[in-house]
Each structure stands twice: as C-alpha cells, then as structure tokens.
C-alpha cells in the first residue's frame, strides 16, 4: 500500500485523484514535497504558510486539506482531531455534553 492509499481512508472522501485534479499533484507527491520542506517538524499553521508561499496556485481550502492530510499520514494528527483539542483528541460538542450531563453548567 502506498503512502497516498494509507492517507485516503483517514482523510475521508478526498482521493489522490481529487487532490491531483484540484492541485496538479496527488497525495504521494504532496507528501514528498512537504517531507522535503521539513513539514514533519512544523506546526499546522507553518505548513499552511509554507504552501501559501511556495505553492500560491493552491487555494486556501486545499492548503488546509493538504496540511491535514500530511499530518494524518505522518501521525501528527488522528482522524477527527481539531487544532484546539490536540491534547485531548476529537472535538466535543457542548450540546451533546449538555444532553448527556443535564446537571452540569456549560463551560
């Protein structure tokens, strides 16, 4: 299984073919490019900034998608994880929490 195939199930519906159609490169190429740029040692916003500066042809939405896909492929993020909840995992919903714990005050 290629690295691109490993990312696709984690990333959901965005196939390497879709990435290629939108950006001109598939997942494997983006993984190589971002590895070469040292993205494994950078924070999410730094990866997005790198993409904005070095690949201005890529739209803002795709820069975010590429950064998240890269983080998933390199084990820097788990599926469903948000930036604000990195230490805890997936984001929780206040409404779900309130329904599950009606006696608690919302934070």
Image (tube, rainbow, N blue to C red):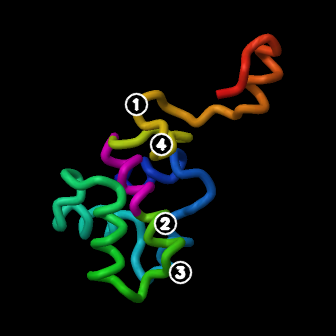
Task: Residue 91: give x, y in percent of width and height.
Answer: 58, 36
**Answer yes or no: do the residues labelled 1 and 3 have beta carbons within 8 Å?**
no
Pointer 1: what residue?
A: 87
Pointer 4: what residue?
A: 84
**Answer yes or no: do the residues labelled 2 and 3 have beta carbons within 8 Å?**
no
| 48 w.r.t. 102: above or below | below
**Answer yes or no: do the residues labelled 4 and 3 have beta carbons within 8 Å?**
no
Around disc 2, counting alpha carbons within 10 Å, would you say few (fewer than 14), some (14 to 19), or many (20 or more)?
A: some
In the image, is 90 to the left or to the right of 102? Answer: left
Secondary structure under tag 3 reads helix
The image quadrant where one finds the C terminus is top right
Magenta stretch holds residue 70 = yes
Cα separation between marks 1 and 3: 34 Å
| Depth check, front residue: 84 or 8 | 84
Which of the labelled discs sits on residue 21, or is there none? 3
Cα separation between marks 4 and 3: 30 Å
Foreground disc of the pair 4, 2: 4
Foreground disc of the pair 4, 3: 4
Secondary structure under tag 2 reads helix
Which of the labelled discs sits on residue 16, or is there none? 2
Cα separation between marks 4 and 2: 27 Å
**Magenta region, residue range:** 67-75
Which callout, 4 or 2, points at the residue further toward the start of the chain? Answer: 2
What residue do we see at 83% from left, 22% from top?
A: 99
Task: Residue 73: give x, y in percent of width and height.
Answer: 37, 48
Which callout, 4 or 3, points at the residue further toward the start of the chain? Answer: 3
């Amino acid at each position: 299984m290629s690295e691109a195939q490993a990312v696709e199930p984690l990333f959901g519906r965005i196939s390497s073919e879709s990435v290629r159609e939108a950006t001109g490169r598939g997942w494997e190429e983006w993984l190589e490019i971002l590895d070469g740029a040292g993205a494994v040692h950078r924070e999410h916003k730094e990866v997005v900034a790198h993409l904005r500066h070095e690949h201005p042809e890529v739209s803002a939405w795709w820069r975010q998608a590429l950064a998240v896909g890269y983080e998933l492929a390199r084990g820097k993020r788990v599926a469903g994880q948000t930036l604000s909840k990195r230490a805890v995992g997936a984001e929780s919903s206040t409404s779900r929490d309130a329904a599950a714990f009606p006696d608690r005050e919302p934070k």
